[in-house]
Image (spheres, helix red, strand yellow):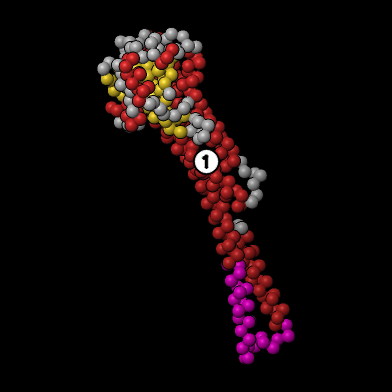
């Protein structure tokens, strides 16, 4: 799908400063290349990870790409490779996933005639704002996880607590994965802003350079914020794992105490249950009560000892 800004009749692209193509077909690619003499990057090209592939100059135009974190209706977030082609006459964005970010930029520009560099700066600013929103959502998710991990007064059942902590480990693990993608996206956007200032200084006005520098400064602060969230994720994962281990150790301690306290009674019952003919206790009138009292006594004494040692 090809859309031009401002809207142009019959897809002629005459007077358009921004062309946004979603999952382009050959006819749309041919229309753009004929109108501006620029090449449309393929999905494989915008998915490259080398810096030299993400940032390059071809025939006076800047070819850039970044893996954007986008939210869709089907998935909470996806990584969508997106290409940018910036020249003096046009801005081309090539993407393969629908996103409301680019639609919101179109609404903010109010369909007025703007230079491609102005549109490009607006798109970058909107993308950085979107990443900031994702970081805020991740921070809120970590706050909720922290509340559940460190304030568990209402939990009493060990099985329920362990199950909840395991779910939190999965959630924080997903957040950690998202943070890795967000950090890389910020790095790519920062490189794009600096690359544009360096290679497009002749086209850019002073105000646009200042805005791109502000974008880089915002990205730097977001990267520091993201680093703090990554540290929080590690802390919460360690805490949840530690609590699970402590709970499991408590269970093992109880089983160990029970087994130790049960050994003497089993031994006594085994001895007096052999029923040999020459056993002195076999003919005792009080032999049965004596054995029962001995079993109870040998059960209670270890428990008293464990309690005195503060092991239970």
What element does badge 1 sit on? helix
Q: Position of residue 15 (x, y in %)?
A: 39, 9
| Residue at image location 61% in from the left, 49% down from the top | 160
Please state the horizontal and vertical placement of residue 270, each as a whole percent of the image.
60, 79
Q: According to the image, label 1 marks what residue? A: 171
Residue 51, percent across and down?
30, 28
Residue at 49% across, 20% down = 103
Q: Give the answer, above or below, for where 18 lies relative to 151.
A: above
282 and 201: which is toward the camera: 201
- The quarter of the image holding the N terminus is top left
Q: Nearer the viewer, residue 198 or 84?
A: 84
Q: Which residues are magenta?
A: 260-286
Q: Identify the residue at the far left of this view.
A: 59
Q: Kindly identify the residue that appears in the image at 57 percent across and 49 percent down.
A: 162
In the rendered image, the vertical position of residue 114 relative to residue 99, given as above or below: above
Towards the viewer: 9 or 277: 9
> Looking at the picture, how far across and down is residue 69, in whole percent?
45, 30
């Amino acid at each position: 799908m090809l859309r031009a800004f401002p809207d142009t009749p019959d897809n002629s692209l005459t007077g358009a400063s921004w062309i946004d193509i979603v999952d382009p077909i050959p006819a749309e690619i041919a229309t753009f290349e004929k109108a501006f003499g620029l090449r449309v990057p393929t999905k494989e090209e915008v998915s490259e990870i080398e810096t030299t592939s993400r940032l390059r100059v071809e025939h006076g135009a800047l070819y850039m790409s970044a893996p954007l974190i986008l939210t869709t209706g089907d998935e909470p977030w996806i990584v969508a490779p997106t290409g940018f082609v910036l020249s003096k006459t046009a801005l081309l964005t090539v993407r393969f996933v629908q996103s409301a970010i680019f639609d919101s930029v179109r609404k903010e520009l109010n369909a007025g005639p703007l230079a491609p560099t102005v549109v490009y700066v607006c798109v970058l600013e909107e993308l950085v704002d979107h990443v900031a929103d994702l970081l805020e959502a991740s921070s809120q998710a970590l706050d909720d996880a922290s509340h559940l991990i460190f304030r568990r007064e209402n939990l009493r059942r060990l099985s329920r607590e362990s199950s909840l902590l395991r779910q939190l480990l999965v959630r924080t693990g997903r957040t950690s994965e998202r943070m890795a993608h967000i950090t890389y996206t910020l790095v790519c956007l920062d490189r794009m802003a600096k690359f544009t200032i360096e290679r497009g200084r002749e086209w850019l006005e002073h105000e646009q350079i200042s805005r791109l520098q502000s974008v880089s400064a915002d990205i730097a602060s977001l990267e520091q914020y993201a680093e703090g969230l990554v540290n929080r994720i590690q802390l919460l994962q360690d805490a949840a794992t530690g609590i699970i281990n402590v709970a499991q150790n408590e269970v093992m301690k109880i089983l160990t105490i029970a087994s130790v306290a049960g050994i003497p009674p089993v031994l006594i019952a085994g001895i007096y249950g052999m029923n040999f003919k020459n056993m002195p206790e076999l003919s005792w009138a009080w032999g049965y009560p004596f054995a029962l009292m001995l079993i109870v006594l040998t059960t209670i004494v270890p428990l008293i000892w464990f309690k005195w040692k503060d092991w239970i």
